[in-house]
Amino acid sequence: MATTYTEERRLHLQALAELLPDHGLVGRMVGGGEPVLWVWHPRTGRQTLIFATPTQRGWLFLWSPGGQGGADELEMTVEALKAILGADAEQPSGES
């Protein structure tokens, strides 16, 4: 049986997941009773897991390496994820 805490965490992660495709990212909920969001960039192959945790100022998303974003700032959070996983982080391919 899911607790209110788990249900709220899942809702925040789902809200974030819904925005990912508009920014070229893909996500999938994993973890069953303790949900986390697996996010990856299809072109670069970079990926991370997103945890959601309550704080005194509201819910916070955390990811490696050292990333964080507020659940009340979904667009900014997705942009930060895109920057570390996406084309902004790609190395030049050397194509002419």
Image (cartoon, helix red, strand yellow):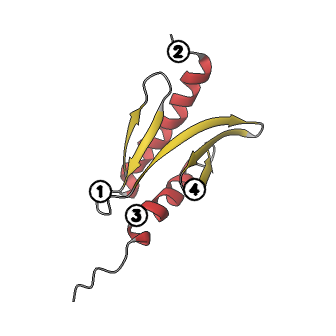
The residue located at (44%, 47%) in the rendering is: 19
Q: What element carries label 2?
A: loop
- For marks 2 and 3, give the CA distance: 34 Å
- For marks 3 and 4, give the CA distance: 15 Å
| Circle 3: residue type | Gly
The answer to whether marks 4 and 2 mark residues whose Cβ atoms lie closer than 8 Å is no
Q: Nearer the viewer, mark 4 or mark 1?
A: 1
Near mark 3 (Cα within 10 A), the count class, few <14, some 14-19 or many ≥20, is many
Q: Is mark 3 on a helix, strand or loop?
A: loop
Near mark 4 (Cα within 10 A), the count class, few <14, some 14-19 or many ≥20, is few
In the rendered image, residue 92, in percent from the top left (x then y), is placed at 34, 81
Instruction: Report which residue position mark 3 lands on.
Output: 86
| Circle 1: residue type | Pro
- For marks 3 and 1, give the CA distance: 9 Å
The disc at residue 62 is: none
The answer to whether marks 4 and 1 mark residues whose Cβ atoms lie closer than 8 Å is no
The disc at residue 76 is: 4
**Tag 1 or tag 4, which sits nearer the N-term?**
1
Q: Is mark 4 on a helix, strand or loop?
A: helix
- For marks 2 and 1, give the CA distance: 32 Å
**Tag 3 or tag 2, which sits nearer the N-term?**
2
